[in-house]
Image (cartoon, rainbow, N blue to C red):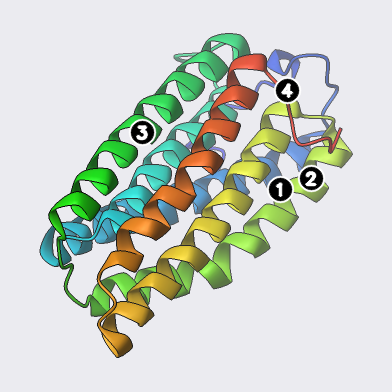
Amino acid sequence: MNDLVTIRADRVDSCAVRPNHVKHVVGLQIVTLAWMLIELVCATVAARRAHSVALLAFGSDSLVEVLSATVVLLQFTTVFHLSKATAARLAGILLFVLAAVVTGVAATALYMGAAPESSQLGIAITAAALILMPVLAMLKRNKARETNDKALAADSAQSATCAFLAAMTLCSLIATKLFNIHWIDAAAALCAVPVLIIEGRRALRGEDCGCC
C-alpha cells in the first residue's frame, strides 16, 4: 500500500490525520476505484447491448464515482496534487453534463418508443453494487467523521447515490425482463436526473454530506 501511495498527511486541508487513519482511507479508495472501474465497464457494455438508458445513467454515475474516489486519493499524494475546490468544480460540471445527456437520451427513447432488451449482465452488476456500495458508503462516512475529511464525506455521499441508482436500475431491468415493460427503463433514467443535479450542485458549492 505504501508503495502505491506516498502519504503526506500534512497535505490534507484543515486535518491532522493519524497515519493509521490515512492508510484506512487510502485502502477504502483503492477498493472503490477497483470496483467502480469494473462497474463502469460492465454497465457501459450492458447498456450498449441492451439499448438501456437506465444502465447508461448508472454507468455515467460510475464514471463520476471514479473521479470522486481519485480526488480523495490525490489529497495524500505528492504527485498531481489537486485542490479540493478545483476537483469539486470539475465533478459538479461533469454531473450536470451527464444529467443533460441522460435527459436527452431518455426523452428520445420515450418519444420513439424504444424497446430495451433484457440484460443479465446489467442485472448482475447492479445487484452487486446494491450490496457493496452501502457498505462502502457507511465505512467512508464513519472514517470521514474520525478524520474531519470533507472530501471523503462527499465521496461517501457519492457511494450512497450509486447504491440508490443501482436499486432503481435493477428494478427497471427486472420489470423489463419479467413483464416486458419497455417504457420503465427510460422512466428510471429520468428519475436519476434529479439525483445527478442535486449532487452536481453540492459539488459546485463544495458541500459535504454533513458528516464532519
Q: Residues within 10 Å of mark 1 (few under 14, many from 20)?
A: many
Disc 2 marks a residue whose amino acid type is Lys
Q: As displayed, is residue 73 above or below residue 15?
A: below
C-alpha gap between disc 2 and disc 3: 29 Å
Disc 1 marks a residue whose amino acid type is Lys
Q: Can residue 201 be seen in this view?
A: yes
Q: How crowded is mark 3: few (under 14 residues within 10 Å), some or many (20 or more)?
A: many
> Which of the two marks, 3 or 4, is nearer to us in this view?
3
Q: Residues within 10 Å of mark 4 (few under 14, many from 20)?
A: some
C-alpha gap between disc 2 and disc 4: 15 Å
C-alpha gap between disc 3 and disc 1: 24 Å
> Which of the two marks, 3 or 1, is nearer to us in this view?
3
> Residue under circle 1?
140
Q: Nearer the viewer, residue 43 or 192?
A: 192
Whole-percent x and y of residue 65?
47, 41
**Residue 97 falls in which quadrant of the image?**
top left
> Residue under circle 4?
9
Q: In this view, does 13 lie to the left or right of 94?
A: right
> Residue under circle 2?
143
Whole-percent x and y of residue 159?
59, 50
Disc 4 marks a residue whose amino acid type is Ala
Q: In this view, does 185 lie to the left or right of 87?
A: left
Mark 2 / mark 4, whichever is N-terminal:
4
Whole-percent x and y of residue 6?
56, 27
Q: Which of 20 and 33 is in front in this view?
A: 33
| Circles 1 and 2: CB atoms closer than 8 Å | yes
> Residue under circle 3?
98
Disc 3 marks a residue whose amino acid type is Leu
Q: As displayed, is residue 105 above or below residue 130?
A: above
